[in-house]
Amino acid sequence: MPKGRAKPPKYVAHKERRILGENVGRRMRERYKDKTDQTKALAEESGVGRSTIQRIVDPVTYGSYGPTIDTIALLARALRCESSELLESVE
C-alpha cells in the first residue's frame, strides 16, 4: 500500500453485524422464552450450529463474524420472519 494512505477497515459491515446480532438475540429470546437453552432450541430448529449462533448474538464477537446469506435465511425461517427483518435497525 502506498505511503500516506489509510488502511481500509477490516470489517466494513460492523454496524450491520451488530444489528443482526441484536435482532437475532431479541427474536430468539421471544420465540424460545419457555426454553432453558434458547441457543440450542434455535440451533435445532434452524440447522445452524450453536457456536455460529453464539458468535452472531455475542456483542464481543459479532463484529468479527460475518454469517452467510444462507445462514441468515435459515435463522429467519426458524424465527418466523424475513431475512431483511433481521437486518433492519430497530432504533
Image: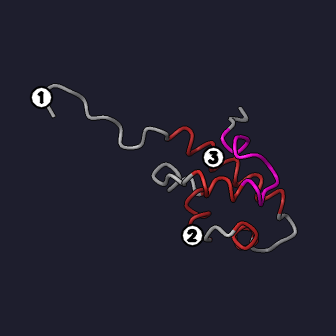
Tell me, yes or no, whether the highlighted magenta stretch contains residue 63.
no
Reading the image, the residue beneath label 2 is 51
| Residue 3, image x, y percentages | 12, 28
Quarter of the image where the C terminus is located: top right
Which element is circle 1 on? loop
Q: How many marks?
A: 3
What kind of residue is marked 2?
Ser
Q: Report whether 15 appears left or right of 78.
A: left
What kind of residue is marked 3?
Leu
Q: Which residue is most to the top?
A: 4
Answer yes or no: do the residues labelled 1 and 2 have beta carbons within 8 Å?
A: no
Q: Report whether 60 appears left or right of 48.
A: left
What kind of residue is marked 1?
Lys
Reading the image, the residue beneath label 3 is 20
Quarter of the image where the N terminus is located: top left
| Residue depicted at x 36% and y 43% | 10
Q: Residues within 10 Å of mark 1 (few under 14, many from 20)?
A: few
- Which badge, 1 or 3, comes first in the chain's sequence? 1
Reading the image, the residue beneath label 1 is 3
- Which residues are the magenta region? 76-87
| Residue depicted at x 69% and y 36% | 88
Q: CA distance from mark 1 to mark 2?
A: 40 Å
Q: Residues within 10 Å of mark 3 (few under 14, many from 20)?
A: many
In the picture shown, does residue 59 fall above or below 35?
above
Q: Nearer the viewer, residue 59 or 71?
A: 71
Which element is circle 2 on? helix
- Which badge, 2 or 3, comes first in the chain's sequence? 3
In the picture shown, does residue 88 fall above or below 62?
above
Residue 52: quadrant of the picture: bottom right
